[in-house]
Image (spheres, helix red, strand yellow):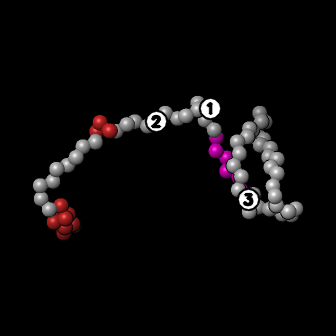
Amino acid sequence: MEVSKLTTKIDKSGYLNLNIPTQLPAGDVNIVVVLNPVSSKGKQQASYDFYDLVGRLTWLGDAVAMQRTLRDQW
């Protein structure tokens, strides 16, 4: 089994032509093709930075005991 990754072009008529040399002997093979469009914009912009919304909860008590109490209410 061989795994190959390459970037190629689809022509204007929508055809994808592949010519891939292999080290495999002549015979039948199974082929799996995954088409993943390449963005022409280059790198995608980073998603929003939520760092300014991050906080820390100060808990004054036994968190496990409170969790058990809440669970017992179900």
Residue at image location 69% in from the left, 49% down from the top: 5
Dot 1 or dot 2, earlier in sequence:
1
The disc at residue 63 is none
Q: Which element is circle 2 on? A: loop
Q: Where in the figure is residue 8, as x and y percent of width and height?
A: 73, 40
Picture quadrant of residue 3: bottom right
Q: Which residue is mark 2?
A: 46
Q: Where in the figure is residue 37, as x and y percent of width and height?
A: 64, 40
Query: Mark 1 and mark 3: span between their CA atoms?
Result: 29 Å
Question: How many numbered circles are shown?
Answer: 3
Picture quadrant of residue 1: bottom right
From this viewpoint, which residue is outermost toward the left? Answer: 60
From this viewpoint, which residue is outermost toward the front? Answer: 23
Which residue is at the front of the view, 2 or 31? 2
Magenta-span inclusion, residue 22: no
Q: Which residue is mark 3?
A: 2
Q: Which residue is mark 1?
A: 40
Q: Which element is circle 1 on? A: loop
Dot 1 or dot 3, earlier in sequence:
3
Q: Which segment is the magenta one?
A: 32-37
Could you tell me the amino acid type at mark 2? Ala
Q: Is residue 36 above or below residue 63?
A: above
